[in-house]
Image (tube, rainbow, N blue to C red):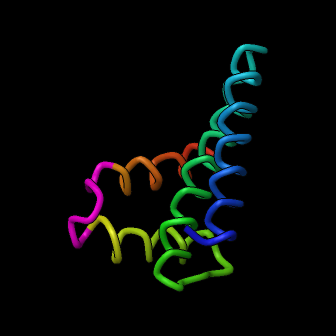
Amino acid sequence: MTPAQLNLLLKARQSLGAARLILDGQYPDYAASRAYYTMFYIAEAFLEGEGLSFSKHSAVISAFGREFARTGRVPVKFHQFLIRSQELRNA
């Protein structure tokens, strides 16, 4: 695992912790945003492992689906979770 991947996984772990705290504080909309970032950082870490990096969220989500979900390397439901969480974040 590369240092960049480790950094992204650390960010994901911190974001998940923040989401839990925010949800406990009765702010579900903000918690959903942090939960999205948890999944987003993990998707970026997967792509980093393939030498892929993108500047737009939509490009990361698309590439994650193309490289990992569509090929069966991860269950399709994880790509769907990422898409749905972005929709909730943007709502």
**Which residue occupies 65% across, 50% down?**
37
Q: Is residue 88 left or right of residue 18?
A: left
- To which quarter of the image does residue 20 belong? top right
Location of the N terminus (image quadrant): bottom right
Q: In this view, does 16 lie above or below 68?
A: above
Judging depth in this view, the residue of 16 and 83 nearest the camera is 16
Q: Percent from the top left, x then y, of residue 53?
A: 60, 82
Q: Percent from the top left, x then y, of residue 65?
A: 36, 69
Location of the C terminus (image quadrant): top right
**Which residue occupies 61% across, 72% down?**
2
Q: Percent from the top left, x then y, of residue 31?
A: 69, 31
Q: Is residue 29 above or below residue 6?
A: above
Q: How many labels were placed on the picture?
A: 0
Judging depth in this view, the residue of 16 and 9 nearest the camera is 9
Q: Is residue 76 magenta?
A: yes
Boundaries of the magenta span: 70-77
**Which residue occupies 52% across, 46% down?**
85
Q: Percent from the top left, x then y, of residue 10?
A: 70, 50
- To which quarter of the image does residue 6 belong? bottom right
